[in-house]
Amino acid sequence: MNVKIGISPIAWQNDDLPDITAAFTMEQALKEAREIGYTGVERGQRMPSDTEGLRAYLDGNDIALCGGWCSGASLVNDFATERDAVRAQVEQFVALNSPCIVYAECSNTVQGQIGTPVNHRPKLAKDEVMAYAAKITDLAKWMGDQGMTMAYHHHMGTIIETEDEVNWLMEGAGPEVKLCFDTGHLLFGGGDVMATLNRWGDRVHHVHFKDIRPSMVQDTRENNRSFLDAVIAGAFTVPSDGCIDFQAVAHALKAMDYDGWIVVEAEQDPAKAPPYEYSKMGYDHIVDVCGQAGLEIAA
């Protein structure tokens, strides 16, 4: 059993805040990520959209596709409509041997609205989350039949943000719905990182190592700032630069025989947090905690 270390290019190329990363290119992101030691990258919007173009792009940078975001709308779409909406991405990710699609409900999210406080996100009652979970189970089953795993991403500003909502989702969904476990989003949402990981370890298929700066999170909550305001202010950072105990996370992953990807996803203002420097900081910390936990890292 071993893990692989990947990264989202969001530190160099932020899809939601393109102005703050205008001085950087996707080519630079992949080149520097590979130089640091990352062997995989999640898909970014500024990569080639066609499958063969993307394959050549990744191969040319000697880096694998280790997942990618999918903006879901299962809350408002019926199964057939949502299946058709995600079909092209599923087919592409299967062709490129991606380990999963990172799926999140975006039909009513406020995560991309800089004028809307993240505190004003949409919320569902437990029975509504459970009903939603049943809907996405059908989609996850279909994805699985195509050869692709759905890893659900609990995310700030969406209907699945808190620890309770993650629990309800996992309770209501079938085993086909796996979890993209994101340390930073869970703690930002007020959840217990280790309790949630230990509870749902058998469903964790993809892991985001994301740290937070508590003072920035507190400011976001107390002053009704948006998710994007929080990103610009520096609420998120790479492992070892915030408050999360990633050594404990690594030990838990070892105990559950996790053998998937560990992905750094830490969007920041590059003027404050130079992407190469911070991405290397995160990589080095992951190597260290994996080594101490006995998690072997695949070459």
Image: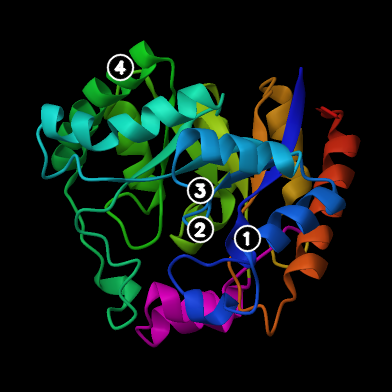
| Three-letter code for the amino acid on which mark 1 is drawn | Met
Mark 2 neighbour class, 10 Å CA radius: few under 14, some 14 to 19, many 20 or more:
few
Residue 65: % across, % down: 60, 36
Q: Mark 2–mark 1 contact, CB under 8 Å?
A: yes
Kindly identify the residue that appears in the image at 56 percent across and 57 percent down: 184
Foreground tag (4 vs 1):
1
Q: Residue at x 31, y 35 (%)?
A: 169
Which is more toward the observer, 83 or 296? 83
Q: Say which of 17 and 137 sits in front.
A: 17
Start-end of magenta stretch: 213-239
Q: Secondary structure at mark 3?
A: loop
Q: Specify the farthest residue to the top.
A: 145
Seen from the viewer's position, the closer of residues 23 and 288 is: 23
The residue carrying mark 3 is: 48
Residue 167, picture quadrant: top left
Relative height, residue 151 to residue 275 (above, below): above
Question: Tag 1: Cα neighbours inside 10 Å, few (<14), some, or many (≥20)?
Answer: some
Say which quarter of the image contains residue 84. top left
Secondary structure beneath label 2 = loop
**Local crowd at mark 3 within 10 Å, few (<14), some, or many (≥20)?**
some
Asked whether 84 falls inside the magenta stretch, the response is no
Q: CA distance from mark 2 to mark 3?
A: 7 Å
Real-space CA distance between mark 4 and mark 1, rounded to the nearest whole angstrom = 33 Å
Task: Name the residue that disc number 1 marks.
Answer: 26
Residue of label 4: 141
Identify whether 129 is placed above or below 295.
below
Q: What's the amino acid at mark 2?
A: Arg
Tag 2 residue: 46
